Amino acid sequence: MGNIPLFIPKNIDKYFYNRDKDIKKINFYLNGLHEDISQQLLITGYRGVGKTFLIHKIIKDIDSNFLITYIDISLIYSENDGTINSTVLLTGILSKINQTLEEKNNNKFAKITSSIRNLITNIKLKKYDFNEITTILDIPIPHYEDDYTKISKFVMELPQKIVDKTGEIDGFIIILDEIQMLKQMKNSESFFWLIRSHNQFQTNVSYILTGSTSKTSEIIEMINGETGAFGGRMIQINIDPFTKEETHNYFKDRMPEIQFTENGFDRFYECTRGIPAYINSFYNVLSSDVIYDDKQIKNTFNTSIDQILVMWIKIWGTLNQYEKKIIITILENEESTWNTLYTKTEFSTSTINKYLNSLQNKGIVSYKNKLYVLEDQMIKAWLEHEKETRGFYAE
């Protein structure tokens, strides 16, 4: 096959593999929109398992009677100089909804999209006083400076109004990816309650929330926990790594030039744990001239670890000194309780709690059986390799 792209490629079908059951399950819930039944989905899974790739496959193949808007919250965050607030987020969502309408190339949407563009410009300029246009699809537009209530009401009501006013559209699907970034926003919990408060009365709008975050994270709890905005009503779908058999079939179908001995493949699967991001990056350093046994896989992994685990190298560079210290402490202490972290890091109670929550929301640390553990053993492998080869952990 040659090199496999490690990001979302243009030709999705060429590189997409497996996930038929997941796609059928998700589409089953989305198809309820045809019958005025809207389901809300929370898609979870390990970092690198292919959630975003799966989402883009669904977008590509979506029923033509649905409108679908994809919002990458990390992009909104980065485009706003590493900050995010409610108005910036809502403006970003509104902009993407408008882009969806423009791409539909339907004359019915022309006047709507023009009005929304003007509204977005004025929101960014904090100028909400319109003299000519007072409504869009019968929704009053904001008239007062910094009127967050009216902006939020407009954005939340717009998707259902679009369906109601357009006969050939059965449903509007809004995808929020990288939801862990919302923890950077003040009062992020109120945003999920905002969605819930409007969406519970909408019959043709489905939200899909996804991101790389631990199942035990604070953000998952505030979305779908017992006391969260959706209170368990959001359908939670976990995207699992490939099984050993699925990984074997992936090579057989897509990368047959790579050959393993039995123990070599066992070692390869142990290294990658069936996570597609690791499988693909590992594949990119393998040769068709070698039949890989256990020893050769270990050697290749060790000599190419920076290339195979490039994802974690990038993530490590975004962490602060407190987060790195907590990760290293968990790495060096197999049974890390809260008291272990308090003793070993010598951080204050508030500092430990703050950055433990941050690491859980980022899907790096999870809380299992009253212990804090690293969610992905690959970061452990990389850090241990750094310590062994350089004498110290990566800074």
Image (spheres, rainbow, N blue to C red):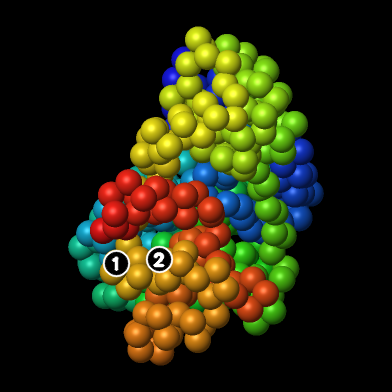
- Density class for disc 2 (Cα within 10 Å; few <14, some 14-19, many ≥20) is some
Gap between marks 2 and 1 measured at Cα? 12 Å
Q: Quadrant of residue 284?
A: top left
Q: Please tell me whether residue 257 is drawn above or below residue 35 in the rendered image.
A: above
Q: Is residue 325 left or right of residue 180?
A: left
Q: Which residue is mark 2?
A: 328
Q: In the image, residue 243 lies at what x, y percent?
A: 72, 38
Residue at 66% x, 48% y: name it.
239
**Which amino acid does the dot numbered 1 rest on?**
Asn
- Numbered label tally: 2
Closest to the observer, 73 or 102? 73
Look at the picture and state if 76 lies above or below 189: above
Please give the label number shown on residue 320: 1
For the point 48% across and 61% down, which residue is it?
Answer: 364
Q: Residue drawn 37% across and 80% down?
A: 345
The residue nearer to you, when weighing 393 against 63, is 393
* Among the 4 quarters of the image, the one containing residue 344: bottom left
Q: Foreground residue, 272 or 333?
A: 333
Circle on res. 350: none
